Image (cartoon, grey):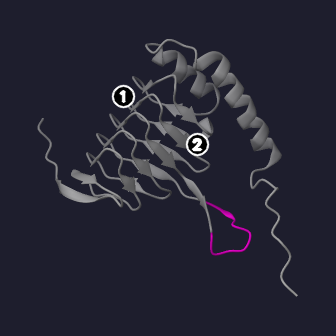
Amino acid sequence: MPPPEPEFRRSPFPLRQQLARLGWRTFWALFMRPSPRVCHGWRAFGLRLWGARIGPGCRIYPRVTVWAPWNLECDGNACVADGVELYNPAPILLGERSVVSQGAYLCTASHDYEKRLFPLVAKAIRVGRDAWIGARAMVLPGCEIGEGCVIGLGSVVTRSTPAWSVCAGNPCRVVKERYSRE
């Protein structure tokens, strides 16, 4: 007799979190998304209301999608551009002066495909200070982008990257070293 079919209709997230996300998405759509691009302080305030830890001088643009603001931490002067999606059932930590460019996708969760019920697996993403994630790049769960690292346009980061390097490709690999010119 074959095993019973898995139950895919049940969410892996508790009802309380689902309701919090619904409230957050409604709040963002009504009060944050329509705000002018220059109103970074207003959007930082809104994110803080929902539990995000946003440092001074951060620039979060209006067309950013944040799945769970309570799992977002941005150190001072971090920048998240329009079209970025932060899917963060696990924490996303953006270091000081880090930049996430247009259309990038940072994903902290996936499913364990080796198990019959495909349980959710979530791992934090850390982006080091002075790092830059290029436009339309993807960063997968559990990856750490090293301090000063540059991730090239459209790259797919499947594992952590070293500090002060330039990385690109699918899968993302070190292309060369990067030196600070301060």
What kind of residue is marked 1?
Answer: Asn
Q: Position of residue 110 (x, y in %)?
A: 59, 59
Residue 119's place in the image compared with 148, above or below, is below
What kind of residue is marked 2?
Answer: Asn
Q: Quadrant of residue 57?
A: top left
Q: Is residue 119 left or right of residue 175?
A: right
Residue 154's place in the image compared with 80, above or below, is below
Q: How many residues crowd around disc 1 within 10 Å: few (fewer than 14), some, or many (20 or more)?
A: many
Q: Quadrant of the C terminus?
A: top left
Residue 77 circle label: 1
Q: Is residue 161 left or right of residue 92?
A: left
Residue reaching furthest to the bottom = 1
- From the image, tell me which residue sits under label 2: 71
Q: CA distance from mark 1 to mark 2?
A: 18 Å
Is label 2 in a helix, a strand or a loop? Answer: helix
Q: Is residue 179 left or right of residue 13?
A: left
Task: Based on the picture, tell me whether residue 117 belongs to the magenta stretch.
Answer: yes
Q: How many marks?
A: 2
Is label 1 in a helix, a strand or a loop? Answer: loop
Q: Position of residue 33 (x, y in %)?
A: 58, 20
Task: Based on the picture, tell me whether residue 48 belongs to the magenta stretch.
Answer: no
Query: Which residue is located at x 35 percent, y 51 percent?
Result: 155
Query: Which residue is located at x 52 percent, y 26 percent?
Result: 63
Residue reaching furthest to the left = 181
As rendered, which of 159 and 124 lies closer to the eye? 159
Q: How many residues crowd around disc 2 within 10 Å: few (fewer than 14), some, or many (20 or more)?
A: many
As rendered, which of 62 and 129 lies closer to the eye? 62
Sequence-earlier tag: 1 or 2: 2
Residue span colored magenta = 113-121
Q: Position of residue 152 (x, y in %)?
A: 29, 47
Q: Quadrant of residue 157?
A: bottom left
